[in-house]
Amino acid sequence: MISPKDILILSVRQVFRQKRRNLGVVLAIGLGIAGLIAILSMGDEVKKNLNRDLDLLGGVTLVKVSLEEELHPGTRPESFTPETQEAIRNLPGVAVLSATAKEILWLSMLHEQAAVQLPIHSVDADYWSANNLEPVAGALFSTQDVQARERICVLGKTLAETLGGVEAVLGTYLPVGADLYLVTGVVDGLQIGDRKRFVFVPLTTAMDRNPEDRIRPNRLFVRCKTWDDVPVVAGAIPALVERHQSIRYLKVDVAWDQLKRIIAIVWWVELFIYLSIGATLVLGGFGIWNGMMSSVTSRTREIGLKKAMGAEEADIMLQILCESVVLSFWAAVLGVSLGLTAVLVTSHFLGSTPPHQVILRYALVSLGFSCLLGMIAGLYPSLRAARMDAVAAIRYE
Amino acid sequence: MDPIIVLRNLKKLYDSPAGAITVLKGIDLSIRSGEMVAIMGPSGCGKSTLLYILGLLQQATSGEFRLAGADILRLSPKEQAALRRDSIGFVLQSCNLFENTTVYENLEFPLIYGRMPRSRRRARIEEALAMVNLSQRMHQPSNMLSGGEQQRVAIARALINRPKILLADEPTGQLDRTTSKHVMASFKTIIRDHDTAMILVTHDPEVADQCDRACVLVDGTLRPRSTPSRPPAAT
């Protein structure tokens, strides 16, 4: 059998000297590989962004955990301990956890000579990201503000507009009970709903001014990284809470119906994409097979001559097989280049880049897969060439 | 000197729907090293079949075939391929060179199949091209050569492994008279210088006249040509 180096050189030379003939096949496989790398590498990043975007429609990755002891009159008020909160925050799949008070306080104030009832919601600094809320003016209070028990507040956008405008309310003071709270920001968001009319104050500040023990961290908003994490996180929470406190009044809410619908939609989209890539790669494989069959036919006389020179069946078979693999490898290199470019462009638009190891892994998998495709597609043509009768091949016109 | 090729009562039958067809009915032939033998005969008489049997590309049905002392009919296909690689060179009528290759690459193929190390190939290729006066064409694409030059490259390729036997099937069939003479002159020089036995199949009496002897294949048997240019060697 001839040396692997000679086989490789002969195959590379043959494939590249017929590059025009092979261009269609190379492009088909290359595009398939590029799509595969882009989708596999960016899958998690796209999923995160898709989660965020779809979440705006239904909040499906938000798990609401609360203590409902008020449904059982006479029971002692309960709250989530810091240990419980920390344990949930550390669960795999949890992106952010916000501790809030269920109790809404009401503030009466005069505005333009009319009495206005303002709902006051006590929240922590993670409340904004857990609910996808964004500042439209000023700043939302931070972890430091909450820890320092600052007397500051954030207004919902509609309320701010009622009180004089989103910019005008900044720096003014709002009388809450016996204290004045500095308005530092105005908040809005697609999921804000009725909370556009709310006043948000730091949970710690509200708890300090809470003689009746009505304000306490008894509702948690747990935002999961992806919808795949939601069932796992929701399922793990009761046992986790039980390790630190009683779960008699624990209630875990998930928007199961919306979650199932979104997962179903995405499943179909993913299936469609993978089928498209699969079809492209299979067509590419058929392209290689067809190209190699045509090449073997057009080189029948050449194969006969090589046998006359003393080439063994294995020499002929390995050369044709190697040409097929070189062709698909060349296509894969093109595909990996295109795929990496697609990953870079997508990363730029999504604002996040997958880890380099992930990209490298999928690039190597694609190269290996493509070589396998070339080997399978080239097997029959190479066997046909190897088993050709030398005399018939030499006489072939 | 012992003959390098010995055929005794060699027969070749083909199966067909109408029954077995006997193409070669008992060939007797001996050829010595350095001898140039022409085989003539009408189309379809079995000249090429005989040539392919001599080149170990086809198997005889019965008889005796000895090549350089080896009993060919007893060799396995792999052993036959090795013998073909080391001892036999082929030149065909046309389309001898491979597409998309240079002259150098064409000549390299037999050396690759002969497992010659890469480092030793260049010298051998240069030597072979010098034999046919084409050294200056070494790196030209083979399709850029004239018909005569292509055939000389094919001769160089057939001889590059220094074979004991050179087989040619109508090697001048598609060449003009002048080029044909040049090619035959190349053959004669090489045969003489390298002590190679050559058997060529031809329809052209002028080509046959330039050989040491000529035989005619008629009705499946080989006979000396009736008007040879030189006395035939003993068979």
Image: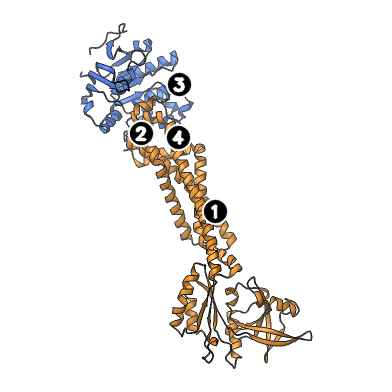
Chain colours: A orange, B blue
Residue at image mark 1: A341
Q: Secondary structure at mark 4?
A: helix
Q: Secondary structure at mark 1?
A: helix
Name the residue type under label 4: Ser
Q: Secondary structure at mark 3?
A: helix
Residue at image mark 2: B121
Q: Cα distance, mark 1 to mark 2?
A: 43 Å
Q: Residues within 10 Å of mark 3 (few under 14, many from 20)?
A: some
- Which mark's residue is nearer the viewer, 3 or 4? 4
Q: Is residue B58 above or below residue A316?
A: above
Same chain shared by disc 1 and disc 4: yes
Q: Cα distance, mark 1 to mark 4?
A: 33 Å
Q: Is residue A56 above or below residue B23?
A: below
Q: Cα distance, mark 2 to mark 3?
A: 25 Å
Residue at image mark 4: A294
Q: Is residue B194 above or below residue A83?
A: above
Name the residue type under label 3: Gly
User: As rendered, which of B186 and A205 lies closer to the eye?
Assistant: A205
Chain letter of the residue carrying label 2: B
Query: What residue do we see at 59% from left, 74% from top?
Result: A131
Check contact, mark 1 vs mark 4: CB within 8 A. Answer: no
Res B130 visible = no
Chain letter of the residue carrying label 4: A
Q: Position of residue A290 (x, y in %)?
A: 46, 38
Say which mark, if any, is on residue B147. 3
Q: Is residue A288 left or right of residue A215?
A: left
Q: Residues within 10 Å of mark 1 (few under 14, many from 20)?
A: some
